[in-house]
Amino acid sequence: MICLSGLRGTAACLSISQFALICASFNLFTLRDVHAEELEYFQSSFMRQTSEAGHIALDALSKGQDVVPGRYWVAIQVNSRLIDQQHLDFSLAIDNETLVPCLPASLLTLSGVKLDALKDPSSLQTNCLDLAILVPGSTVDFDSSKMLIDISIPQIALRADVVGYVDPKRWDSGINAAYLNYQASAQRGRNRYNGPTESEDLLLNMGVNYEGWRFRSTQALRQGESDKRNWVRSSTFLQRDIPGTLANITVGETSTDGDVFRSIPVQGVLIRSDAGMLPDVLQGYAPIIRGVAQTRAKLEVRQNGYPIYSTYVSAGPYEINDLTTAGSSAELEIVLTEEDGQVRRFTQPFSTLSNLLREGVWRYSVFAGRYNAVYDMSAPLLWQSTLTVGTGWDTTLYGGLMGSDFYQAGSLGLAKDLGAIGALAFDVTRSNVQINTINDQSLRGMSYAIKYGKSFKTGTDLRFAGYRYSTQGYRDFDEALRERSQSSDFLGSRRSQIVASLYQNLTNSSSVNLSLSHQDYWGTDYNQRQFQFSFNTQHKGITYSLMASQALSDTYNNDRQISLSVSIPLDFALASNATFDVQKNGDHFSKRSSISGKIHNQKLSYRASLSQTESQQTSTSFSTNYQTPFASLGGGVTYGTDYRSLAINTSGAVLLHDQGIEFSPYLGETVALIQVPQIAGVGVVNATGALTNKEGFAIAPYMRPYRINHLELQTDDLDPTIEIENGTAQVVPRRGAIVKHVFTARKINRLLLTGSMPNGQPLPFAAQVSTADGEQLGVIGQAGQILLSTDLTPQTLTVRWGVLSDQHCELKIEPEAMQNLDGFYTQDLVCR
């Protein structure tokens, strides 16, 4: 028993076991606190080094220093977006353990930080910025293995106009190349009543890029039951960007925009602005927030209760014109906090339509040429110009002029954000047309249109609602030309048209969509009406879809379709999905069951189905598709009670460039050609199924024009003899460009060397090994060993473990003369 006296003469008695437990606990917590304050230290004496190199290296490693303070060439990325590469100075932080870069003030501009919104702008005058203090919430990380500075800046501190913005100096016109996209199909069948049937189709989309010019042509060859081949060319044109105008020029066969007048096929010269060249934030509409601050105040904008924008404004009038919003309408809450703590709040509702632009943003088009007649109609000369300008007061003005030798038209419209009410657009168009060339019969008329759009708090989105009324004398250009040519396709001039689209979210997994349209004509009872309804939901992994549609006209009065589909995921055998659906088309009823799946690394897909009609006629079908690195191959067979058919199809692309011909399953409008010289079988992360061929080429389709596109190689399964310096890259192509990027790669050999000093001592631990050109290959490990990756060329390596003249030596290596052991060239060498 152990007794302890208290301060006031009291005593407490403990058993020996209790006392030992308390002492052990005390020692445990004490040691924990002591070790928490001590730095980690590695004992270097066991290494038996003759120099201080080992001690210095271990001391640096204990502090997490992979590189020493100095000046280095590094890549800089902000929010995972590469913005620059430059030399930066690195120094030890206050803790003397980590390296921190000296960030210049110019880096904030490159990053897109709102400089005028900084709480203390005077801090920009320092040589090295403290980003964490300057922009709260930001971080700076340095990855010495990649020589990469990764900066994270809260999105709320960035200018909205830099979201998606890329300096036009980086836009790449790409290489000179030619390509061909093709789709080919053939079908053979036999019907009990009509006998044998067959058809063949070939669709070609070809292009040539040369010195910034882009030639494009789309053509189709069709052969039907009559064995008559029909060759159709839909468009052929030359195109290029016009520097400094945010526009491009097109020469040849194309189509005009449908923003102001109806889109029509034309031949000639077309100059029009390209919205893709604008930053993402300027491509859509958002209101401008204006007000007056009493002092330098903090301004915050919230949407649905969440902050979407924050900045500091100076005393006096302010204007926020770089706002980024979500959705087509909302109510924004603006919170202004003055320096004295006074808080003022107000709201600003907004709504938008497709033709609403931000203030200061404008789009235009100018065309001169001919109408490109598809059928046997005349091709008169034609000119057209349109202009859309975002003005003040949340208003956009738009209009245009159009003329020919027999047709003149002018249009003027206004779109307005009415806030909580919605967005409204109204335009009026006047036409003057000479229909009869013999007696100079002239028709004049007006057309009025109104559009409305709004999203409601109930989750209802009235995506588009419009009504157009035209007087009896109004004609658009296509109507006037058909009437003038006495075409059988002319149904009369359009009198009125109503269109509407409604979308409703019911739950997170359920939605309803409804669209309606109605159109009638002057001088005839003919009209067209159509509606489409769809309901989609998901419950416990099972997807349910209900769809109904009907098109009513004088010709088709009972074209009604109703279908219900149930899709069940499967996880057994080779099947991944089972679908059951029923359909009623007019007076005909049918039901179908099908099963589908993907195998062979998702490259081979198949679908098998069994269907039956109300008259008990059955049919069985099976189709499959295989995705190869160079093309897509497919086929299917159907066998029914009264018919059977066999179909095959293929699609792919061919790319011709100055170093060869490449094949791909598909090409988009804008393409990246990747080369890993002479390295085959390397995959591309953002190009599913793409692998480099034996020359090292692969194609990444569907690049975004005027935007930074990331290319990333799949290096996990590379042969160990292959070394790629950097498996990621960025390209910024112009629209339609074929940009080429070469990844630096080489086939290497692994050398495992054991080096020693002339006196027999092992080379100093952590000594640096470099080539004669100064390229660092590695560092000396334990017992003088080093693992190198190099070619088989004889060379002399330099080993350095200090800055003094006698703290280095040279290793002469001849890899081909070394012993090859399990893929490693090994040898013991003396460094002299």
Image (cartoon, rainbow, N blue to C red):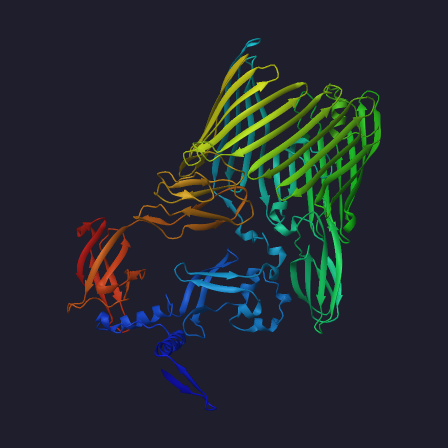
In the picture shown, does residue 134 fall above or below 184?
below
Residue closer to the observer: 314 or 298: 298
- Side of 785 where 595 appears, left or right: right
- Front residue of 51 and 774: 51
Q: How many marks?
A: 0
Asked if residue 38 can be seen in this view, the reply is no
User: Which quarter of the rendered picture does the N terminus lie within?
Assistant: bottom left
Q: Is residue 791 above or below residue 14?
A: above
Above or below for 456 versus 639: below
Residue 513's spot in the image, x, y percent? 68, 36
User: Residue 816: where, in percent of width, then height?
Assistant: 19, 50
**Where in the figure is residue 678, as x and y percent of width and height?**
34, 42
Could you say which quadrant of the image residue 58 lies in? bottom left
**Residue 97 visible in the picture:** yes
Q: Residue at x 38, y 47 (%)?
A: 715
Nearest the camera: 562 or 13? 13
Q: Quadrant of the C terminus?
A: bottom left
- Residue 23 placement, left or right of 523: left
Task: Find residue 341 and report its horizontal and vertical position in percent.
Answer: 71, 72
Residue lying at the far left in this picture: please name it: 759
